[in-house]
Amino acid sequence: MPGIFPTFRQTQLFTYFQDKWQVTPKLTLDLGLRHEIYFAPTAAVPAGFSNYDPDGNRLLLSGKGGNPGDLGVGTRLKSFAPRTGLAYRLTEKTVVRAAFGITIDPSYPDDKWAYNYPVKQNNAFLPLDSYTAAGSMAAGFPPPLPVVIPDSGIIANAPTAQAYVIIPAGLRQAYIEAWNLAVQRQLPGNFALEAAYVGNHAVGILNRVNLNAGQIPGKGAAGQPLNARFGRKADTIGWARMGGNYNGLQVKLDRRYANGFALTTAYTFSKSINFADDNGTLLIPVNFRMNRGRANFDRAHMYVQSFIYDVPAGPGKRWLSSGLAGRILGGWQFNGVLSGYTGTPMTFTYSTASLNAPGNNQRANVNATPSVLGNVGPGVKWFDTSVFSFPAANTFGNAARNTLSGPGYVNLDLSLIKRFQFTERWRMELRAETFNFTNTPHFNNPSSALDSTQFGEVRSAFGERQVQLGLKLIF
């Protein structure tokens, strides 16, 4: 239907300085500084943005009346992002490297950050009863009934059943501080070893907070602040600036490609902490600390082994460089990637009905650290469920977020390639590729909902073996 098309305009301006300084024959410095300006977005048309005002239960429309086109977000001019790095050659075979840098997060809170009602409008045309048609195809659709946009730019008494997003004035971009320290050592046999500490710290990441969530367990809708004031029970999304961090030990052993063979072995031991994942929604908005925990994607241990092997036979190779046997046995390449990861974390939850605080998730009670039993399948448990109990009515359970890991992941991918060289320009590849060559089950996490009959059971898997064949002509 015709209305306000949700689109905006934004200008971005970047300047950058970089210099490489050879301080001594052994020490090199890289110095850089970025200055980034993300001018506040403005709607392409008047009233193209809509901001909810929770103090007056009203909607403020951009560019109408006295409302600014950017809804008061403003433009931050102090987003400086320095970067520096150094490399120091201890010996001819040993190098120390270190770096630090700041990266600006240019994103604004949400892809629908200012598209509250009435920017997006819906009309519903319903029949008088179940026996009467709402209209006919011959007559066409009824004409739309667009919302009248007031010249004041204010819609008082905003519809209470709608969910709204609040755009904070003076919104600041988040930024990430990242650093690393690595030692690289050249070894005999074309090998190189690297050990590194890698870390980062996110500052001011915008997390979604339901400001109309129930503030007092047990009070139900009566505990929702906007319900008490305006009779409003729908979600009202605001934003909280929060942090996160990653710290990891990364070790890598490389064999540089030589004589048709290359090998990479990588191992990471790490931990990542944040307050929310996915779209950044806090699951318990009335207590920020209860949302802090391991990130959903966190895996403590990660091991990856990869290799490339070209069979040393055929034209230009060590063996069978001529003749029919060389053409048949030459041109083969064998590749593989072996991956092994520990599992992703899970949170032990319980029915929100026991909490009676709308907009908040509920947790289970845990009386001791659950041990991992490792059983898979219906009727058996991955972890010890006896240490869990139901929380008392109208109270939060004491289980923290993402405390226990699920099943690990082991996978082997292999490929075999045969190359045919017809002329200097024309060649062909016959490829056979397998994913999860051993058809090893990759189990999903067990049910972590205390009120589920499958609590603690692993019931599903993913990643079955796949084989694909391909023919590639290169010219």
Image (cartoon, rainbow, N blue to C red):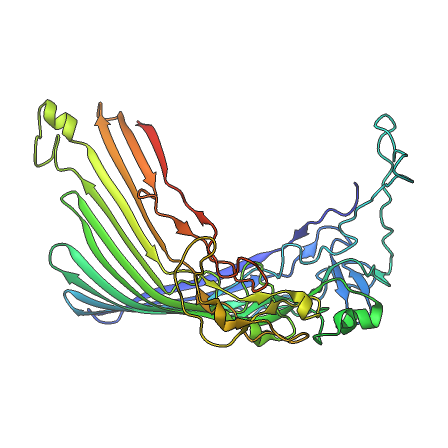
Which residue is at the front of the view, 134 or 388? 388
Q: Position of residue 263 (x, y in %)?
A: 21, 51
x 22%, y 37%: residue: 333
x 85%, y 30%: residue: 140
Which residue is at the front of the view, 171 or 18? 171
Residue 77 placement, left or right of 252: right
Location of residue 262 with respect to 345 vertically, above or below: above
Q: Quadrant of the C terminus?
A: top left
Which residue is at the front of the view, 302 or 88? 302
Location of residue 323 with respect to 347 vertically, above or below: above
| Quarter of the view holding residue 101 | bottom left
Q: Position of residue 305 (x, y in %)?
A: 26, 53
Residue 245 visible, this orientation: yes
Residue 52 placement, left or right of 296: right
x 83%, y 72%: residue: 229
Q: Position of residue 94 (x, y in %)?
A: 18, 67
Q: Position of residue 267 (x, y in %)?
A: 29, 61
x 37%, y 65%: residue: 300
| Quarter of the view holding residue 107 | bottom right
